[in-house]
Amino acid sequence: MNLLKSKNTTLPKDIENTIIKILESSGNSGMNLSELQKILKIKEDKLKLVVARLSRKGIVKKEKIKKEDGKIDYKIQLSTIKPVELKIELSTVIKIPCFTCKYIKECGIGREWSPANCEILKNWLESETNKIEQASK
């Protein structure tokens, strides 16, 4: 499964998705980084960057292992904890008071008008929180 397309390499997101599929098919045991590199046929440094990104996202976990020849490798496995996908509706975002505020151009942290001390924003957030709490009861 060569991920290189002529002179252009595929996008990191494509490589991430391919790694996830390979790890899913490998079962709970996962696989070594060196094995993954042989399958993907990409440079080790690029693979390490993609795996590190997947690790930061909580999608994979990596464990340092010592091979029989004394060299260091990494065991890569899918995390058992799946990241939560937040779904934000546009109708809610449009209602954020900042978008219609007459002070939006002067607003910012440390300025006279700031989200940190805005009563309008605070009241809206409290109202939205109350709606969510009421809906969950």
Image (cartoon, rainbow, N blue to C red):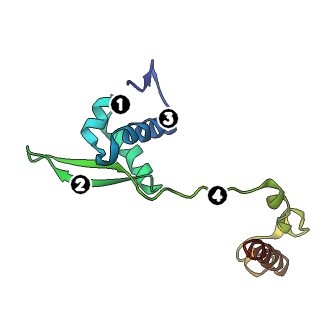
Q: Is residue 38 above or below residue 69?
A: above
The circle drawn on residue 14 is: 3
Task: Decide if residue 10 is on the left or right side of residue 63.
Answer: right
Alpha carbon of mark 4 to alpha carbon of mark 2: how far? 32 Å
Amino acid residing under circle 3: Asp
Residue most toward the left? 69
Q: Quadrant of residue 128?
A: bottom right
The circle drawn on residue 40 is: 1
Residue 112 seen in render: no
Q: Quadrant of the N terminus?
A: top left
**Reading the chain from its start, which is encountered first: label 4 or label 2?**
2
Amino acid residing under circle 2: Lys
The circle drawn on residue 64 is: 2
Residue 54 seen in render: yes
**Reading the chain from its start, which is encountered first: label 3 or label 1?**
3
Circle 4 residue: 86
The reply to whether the C-beta atoms of the residues labelled 3 and 1 are less than 8 Å apart is: no
Secondary structure at numbered mark 2: strand
Along the line of sight, the residue nearer the viewer: 112 or 8? 8
**Reading the chain from its start, which is encountered first: label 1 or label 4?**
1
Alpha carbon of mark 4 to alpha carbon of mark 3: how far? 21 Å
Secondary structure at numbered mark 4: loop
